[in-house]
Amino acid sequence: MNSLNFPPFDYRLKKIDDRPYIFDTARQRYVLLTPEEWVRQHLVHFLVDHRGYPEQLIAIEKEIDVCGLRQRFDVVCHHRDGLPCLVAECKAPTVTLTPAAFEQASRYNIVLAARRLLVTNGHAHLCWEGGELLDGIPFYAAE
């Protein structure tokens, strides 16, 4: 996999039926290593290792009901009280971040009501709070 605009981290890979899998420490299992998963793993490790988000308060690829449709978000970080504080949408590194990616995260946020939205393709990271673009990905301590 290609390098991304995140610090490197130690990861474990293995092959199953000639397909690459990466160990997801948050889900405690190996998951298929797609380009989007590569970005998601880097984002989660960055949030935990460099921004202080507690790993046990991060949910990955969970289903939610959005206006009667079953949707699956990429990453949601929670406050210690269990309420969402950050919704993140991950795209493959080759996908250009467009307003559609932000709209996707916004749809999830109709239900989740997090204060911050983040979209990333591993190269560019765009994070909003209250409709304003932030300068980088905030620390958890700022919650």
Image (cartoon, grey):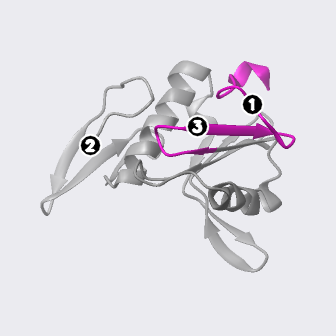
Q: Name the residue under label 2.
A: 1
Between the C-alphas of marks 1 and 3, the distance is 10 Å
Q: Which residue lies furthest to the right in this view?
A: 130
Which of the 4 quarters of the picture holds residue 98? bottom right
- Secondary structure category for the residue under label 2: loop
Magenta span includes 42: no
**Mark 2 touching mark 3, by CB under 8 A?**
no
- Quadrant of the rendering where the C terminus is positioned: top right
In the drawing, does residue 86 fall left or right of residue 56?
right
Q: Which tag is nearer the camera, tag 2 or tag 1? A: 1
Relative to 85, say whether 54 is above or below.
Answer: above
Q: Mark 3 points at which residue?
A: 125
Residue type, mark 3 in image: His
Tell me the tag on residue 134. Answer: 1
Q: In the depicted view, which residue is nearer to us: 36 or 47?
A: 36
**Mark 2 touching mark 1, by CB under 8 A?**
no
Relative to 143, say whether 37 is above or below.
Answer: below
Q: Earlier in the sequence, mark 2 or mark 1?
A: 2
Q: Residue 61 placed where, x, y %?
A: 54, 57
Q: Residue 45 placed where, x, y %?
A: 47, 31
Dot 1 crowding, Cα within 10 Å, few <14, some 14–19, many 20+: some
Q: Residue 58 placed where, x, y %?
A: 60, 40
Q: Read off the magenta span.
A: 119-143
